[in-house]
Amino acid sequence: MIQQLSATPEWDICIIGGGATGLGTAVDAATRGFKTVLFEQHDFAKGTSSRSTKLVHGGVRYLQQGNIKLVMEALKERGLLIKNAPHLVHNQKFVVPNYKWWEGPFYGIGLKIYDWMAGKLGLGPSQFLSKEETLALAPTLDPEGLRGGIVYHDGQFDDARLAINLAQTAAAHHAALLNYFPVTGLLKAHKKVCGVKAKDHFTDKEYEIKSKVVINATGVFTDAVMNMDEPKHKQMISPSQGIHLVVDKEFLPGNTGIMIPRTDDGRVLFAVPWHDKIVLGTTDTPVKTKDPASLLEPVPLKEEIDFILTHIGRYLSKDPQLADVKSMFAGLRPLVKGSSKKTAALSRDHLISISGSGLITVTGGKWTTYRKMAEDVVNIAMEKNGLSQKACITRELKLYGHDQPAIPAALPGLPDERIQAMIKTAVQEEMCMTVEDLLSRRTRSLLLDAKAAMASAPAAATIMAKEMNRDNHWEKEQINTFNAIARHYLPAIN
Ligand SMILES: Cc1cc2nc3c(=O)[nH]c(=O)nc-3n(C[C@H](O)[C@H](O)[C@H](O)COP(=O)(O)OP(=O)(O)OC[C@H]3O[C@@H](n4cnc5c(N)ncnc54)[C@H](O)[C@@H]3O)c2cc1C
């Protein structure tokens, strides 16, 4: 792929950012037949896109807010994604427990509307449950005062694995995608953006890449890239942090998740079965930092951890304690603050804007709607930047990837040959460059059990070093770097 950079005099579409939005855009552009290149400053999905609640959903919260259009769009995308990537997205049952008399009819009717809105792409009807039926599905719910519940369906997925599958799908359609390749500046001719400057992180070699269209898909880094275009532009993004705590399945055995539509301070709380663990979340905390390192590796705050433990404890017969937390991870929502005059809001959920020099920025939205965001931004790129018109084909496009049997969720406990084969695949076919890439996003070890991931880092480093022809010094440095990051995934227990 690096060779393609020198061999291609001009690209049609150059994408900055390798999260859900950028990778989705690369799939859309490449499958329409455009010459497409994507640069990611760190690893694919290192940003927000590996830190979601792992739901492919319409968003019950948006329904409560009355945002019908948004929910319908997301439910449609949910249905398409489950068809196009069945190996990574599955139908997940959730129980809404009812402790007050009005919750049954109120949430029951709301969820019937949710079913109806999904139409033919629905995943199964919601149903009212008796107390006994509710406890049969979620046996650890606190039985005291429980009146019954409602069961409904949504999608559940593995976000970082879907990101890798999107990169593979785009590559299979001749896109070039480079991780560890930050864009450091924009190229301009006659005051119009005509490409980017990008740097190979491992060699420091700089490249000037010409492209007819440049798309900024950098999530919470959106403003930094817009600054490269217009240093005095109005700030667009105000990040909001959400955290998750991961606990053992004993806190919610079985295959059904729990959704609490409204905690006492008005938030939605989920307990989601994910691999062999339960993900609890999330929070919504405005953050001010502009430090790029903390944007890439945000850290859960004590009050966020307390909030989740206290609130989920109110619904479970056995309250999870800090010592039960196997891993915790935080992500930053790229919330759109305001828009310039040139902004074209295509939906209330995501936003696409074009600067005076032609830089296209796409931001907001959610994982579930990445395909629609990509379709919209490539349509705009064709319209405004004079590319030939080509139809979008991603509604029916099967996503590449056969990784379900090959890639396990976590390393410990697997036979050696299986681990070796898996690491080989990650290095040779998935552009896995570091131990952190391997343990955080190729497998999900770090997010599932941080201590176990730290314990497996030395063995993983040795196998990777052999595969990548690296020395002992590299191994040690990789382990140290990984451990420094992984420590923040463990709660501080005194
Ligand atoms: C706590 C939380 C829970 C969520 N849960 C869900 C959920 O359950 N379901 C759902 O549908 N959505 C969910 N979302 C929303 C979803 O995760 C995000 O909308 C989505 O991941 C955003 O993707 P993105 O590509 O826009 O941003 P990112 O994933 O942040 O990608 C931007 C990328 O740009 C790269 N970049 C930045 N600057 C440069 C540069 N100069 N050069 C090259 N690369 C650069 C970054 O390294 C980063 O990888 C959740 C979000 C949060 C925060």
Image (cartoon, grey):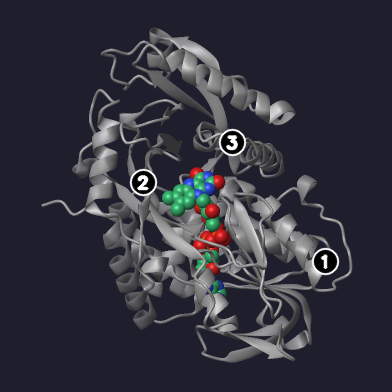
Task: Name the one closer to the observer, 474 or 234.
Answer: 234
> Residue extending furthest left?
494
Residue 311 position, x and y percent, is: 28, 34
Of the pair 207 and 480, the residue shown nearer to us:
207
Q: Mark 1 points at which residue?
A: 383
| Ligand 1 neighbours mark 2 (CB distance < 8 Å) | yes
Mark 2 and mark 1 lie on one chain; the one further toward the N terminus is 2
Query: Vertically, is 442 above or below 68?
Result: below
The answer to which of marks 3 and 1 sits earlier in the sequence is 3
Q: How far apart are marks 3 and 1 (CA)?
A: 36 Å
Q: How far across and down, in percent of the image, does residue 196 sit?
A: 65, 84
Circle 2 residue: 283
Residue topped by disc 3: 90
Circle nearer the viewer, 3 or 1: 1
Q: Quadrant of residue 6?
A: bottom right
Question: Toward which corner of the image does residue 121 lie, by quadrant?
Answer: top right
Task: Please rate how many residues cluster around mark 3, counting C-alpha atoms within 10 Å: few if below 14, some from 14 to 19, many from 20.
Answer: many
Residue for point 43% across, 36% down: 272
